[in-house]
């Protein structure tokens, strides 16, 4: 059982379909051209963080950052997954994951956290 978050944000996990790698037929790569697999995450915590400016000779790229807390300990994220923020339908890239840890005394697991980026520019 996980704790409900009455004032969080409803999120959806987007996972890419896979296809055979054209350079290595024995391997697979993410295929974001195909419709992604969607897993509702329910209501999660959302913490806006700083924005990062990346200088490029052609354009300026701003990457907005956020951190989410997922109360369901069974959800497994990996860098490269995408998260859709359902209220505004923005799609964020997962860039880091802190796995869920379990208390050795009670067995309770508070869930996991993930760092997200939204590049714009």
Image (spheres, grey):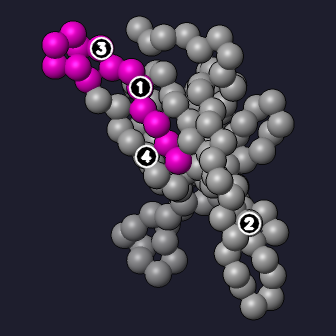
Quickly name the residue at label 3: 108
Q: CA distance from mark 2 to mark 1?
A: 29 Å
- Tell me what residue is drawn at x 46 percent, y 52 percent: 96
User: Which numbered disc flags the more N-terminal residue, 4 or 3?
Assistant: 4
Quickly name the residue at label 1: 111
40 relative to 81, above or below: above
Q: CA distance from mark 4 to mark 2?
A: 21 Å
Segment colored magenta:
102-115
Give 116 or 73, whichever is nearer the viewer: 116
* Label placed on residue 97: 4
Q: Tell me how many marks there are.
A: 4
In the rendered image, which quarter contains the N terminus?
Answer: top left
Q: Are marks 2 and 1 in contact (CB under 8 Å)?
A: no
- In the image, residue 113 lies in the stretch drawn in magenta: yes
Q: CA distance from mark 4 to mark 3?
A: 19 Å
46 relative to 73, above or below: below
- Tell me what residue is drawn at x 53 percent, y 47 percent: 115
* Label placed on residue 62: 2
Disc 1 element: loop
Whole-percent x and y of residue 14? Answer: 62, 42
- In the image, residue 74 lies in the stretch drawn in magenta: no
User: Which numbered disc flags the more N-terminal residue, 4 or 2?
Assistant: 2
20 relative to 96, above or below: below
Q: Are marks 4 and 3 in contact (CB under 8 Å)?
A: no
User: Which numbered disc flags the more N-terminal residue, 2 or 3?
Assistant: 2
Disc 2 element: strand
């Amino acid at each position: 059982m996980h704790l409900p978050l009455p004032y969080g944000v409803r999120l959806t996990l987007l996972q890419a379909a896979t296809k055979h790698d054209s350079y290595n037929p024995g391997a697979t790569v993410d295929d974001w051209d195909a419709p992604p697999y969607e897993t509702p995450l329910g209501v999660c915590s959302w913490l806006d963080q700083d924005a990062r400016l990346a200088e490029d000779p052609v354009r300026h790229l701003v990457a907005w950052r956020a951190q989410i807390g997922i109360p369901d300990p069974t959800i497994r994220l990996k860098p490269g997954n995408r998260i859709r923020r359902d209220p505004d339908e923005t799609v964020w890239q997962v860039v880091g994951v802190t796995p869920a840890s379990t208390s050795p005394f009670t067995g309770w697991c508070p869930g996991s956290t993930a760092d997200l980026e939204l590049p714009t520019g």
